[in-house]
Amino acid sequence: MSATTLLGALLPVVPLAAALVGLLLPPDGGVGRERSRRTAAGLGVAGAAVALLVAVALLVTLDRPVEASTTWVDLGGLAVTLGVRLDGAAALVAVAVTAVALAVQVYSIGYLRRGPHDDVDVDHRYPPYAAQITLFTAAMLLVVVSGDLILLLVGWEVMGLCSYLLIAHDRRLPGAPAAAMKAFLVTRVGDVGFLLGIALLGVSAGSFRIADVLAHDHSTGMLTAACLLLLAGVAGKSAQFPLHTWLPDAMAGPTPISALIHAATMVAAGVYAVTRLYPLFVQAPVALAVLGVMAAITLLLGAFAATAQDDIKRVLAWSTVSQIGYMTGALAVGSPSAALFHLLTHAAFKALLFLAAGAVIHGVGTTLMSRMGGLRTTMPVTFWCTAVGLGALAGVPPLAGFWSKEGVLAAAESAALDGTGPTPAWVGWLVWLAGLLGVAVTAWYATRLLLRTFFGATRIPLAHPHDPPAVMRWPVLLLAVPAALLGLAGFDHGFAHRLLFPTVPVLPPGEALLVHLAPALLVPVALLLLGAGLAWAGWRRDPAADPARALGPLRPVFARAFRLDDVQHALVVRPVTALATVVRTGDEVVVDGVVEGSGRGAYRLGGGLAALHRAALPRAAVAVLAGALLIGLAAVLIGAGA
């Protein structure tokens, strides 16, 4: 085994080992509570830190794609292998995952010391919390480096389990258990399709090794069906329309978990899985066209929904839905490199934004922007970090989000005008126009969030806001660096080459990756200024009022995300619940009734016969004589008749 292969194998193994040890820790109660908490925190931080060092070492040493595997189990001629498939994109994503995981582990030490809404200590279950974060990280890293589809599926499903446990970590918070259950069930719906898609590919190729699946000559119909089924799983994990409704509700969980889910694990897994199997999608343009339609709808849906939210975490949640739409749009128009680059920059600025929002919530005791305001002077570090994150989210040059988002728009423009993508030109037009409109809307709600939270008069008379303690402040400060500067990596040829490792040559040779310094950049920048200017103008007219009032009758529609959750409840949840009630009633009344009724009848018949057998002697004698008399009378009558 080469050193590179060993590093790839260690990536998921290191946090997995730390997670297993952490899960064995006793509950932190009684006299050993603080010791158990410190041990759990140390294991979590150490697991993430060592995994980050391994990821960085892999990134430095990896100079070409590497693959190694060994047969794990043979299922009737279908071999399942244990192995890794390493390339530049895998190494970059691994660094992003482990860096965000380390920041979340360190940040959680301070955040869960005190509750975000009160002064009650909420870390009574900290050891399983820290261990579950580490297991979550290991599962995502398994998805990143796996060389076998079954192994990838294992990591995929473990992430779903960990998300359920972490969202519902503090069961005393209103809505947390229900949000966790919703996330689990909605993503499971998509995972059924993902499992069937993997099964189709494995049976067709005669192997589940990703290399074998990519090299096999699949039939067009089978490949299209498999890719569409895979997209169902992508829609669930990455919160894309129509399986997006779980993600905003997942904000009921702890804020550090929101950062982990939104920045580096769950929502990124779907995009990464498509890039891993992208040569198959290129051969199934129908699936890519469907992905393009999903991306455009999701991009605008998330952006418009974010404009009318009052909860600061829900604004960021809907922005994640929208930004993932940019990534899947880039995939649809034939630029996985642009999708991966936006995935990396999004991991940086979205983790920064959620942790900064957690600092605000920790300081003021509420998640509602209507009760915030005037925090710029009392929380200066948090303010500037949030400004950097929101600037990157909106695409303000030269912050990271500007370059990666421009890469997506440039790819969509090229597919629309030049027909360079693997899908029809109308898909490029759809993604491009949706992306341009999304730039203006994103700038509007990002500006609104900044103004409502940090400017104007304070609306928190009982709170004493302040910047968070060092253990929470340093992760936020360090994440601000890549959020501001990571986009400049697009100018580096070596960085661009690493992003192109896993893809087919869908970009023209020698074309600069993601960065197109051309007059076409003027349109997105103009739309950015338009959106931010409209939000600022509305705020300046009345700093005490919400700029979202300008939405008029659309505001409640956007606040409820076009009521798609209600539509799902009416079309899916209620019919399934009614069907389950009917089935349960039929089972209890008919099936159980027949079984229990026959049992009761036999019991009563036996009881009656037993009572007759236990009759007193006089009654028994009378019965025998009466029976003999009746038999004799019957014999006489029969004889007379004959």
Image: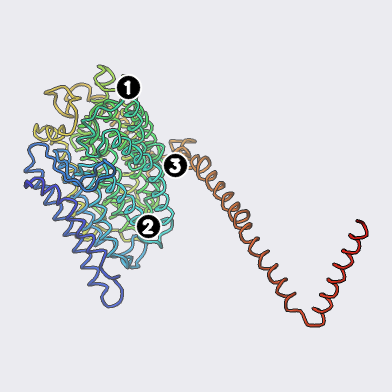
At label 1, counting other C-alpha atoms closer than 10 Å, the crowd grade (few under 14, some 14-19, many 20 or more) is some
Inspect the image, locate mark 2, and give the three-letter code of the amino acid beneath it. Answer: Ala
Please tell me whether mark 3 sits on a helix, a strand or a loop: helix
Mark 2 vs mark 1: which is more N-terminal? Answer: 2
Q: Residue 175 location in percent, x, y?
A: 43, 55
Inspect the image, locate mark 3, and give the three-letter code of the amino acid beneath it. Answer: Ala
Q: Residue 75 location in percent, x, y?
A: 28, 44
Q: How is the image coloured?
A: rainbow
Mark 3 vs mark 2: which is more N-terminal? Answer: 2
Residue labelled with disc 3: 559
Please tell me whether mark 2 sits on a helix, a strand or a loop: loop
- For marks 1 and 3, give the CA distance: 28 Å
Disc ID at residue 168: 2
Could you tell me if residue 547 is visible in this image? no
Q: Quadrant of residue 346?
A: top left
Instruction: State the residue in front, 64 or 360.
Output: 64
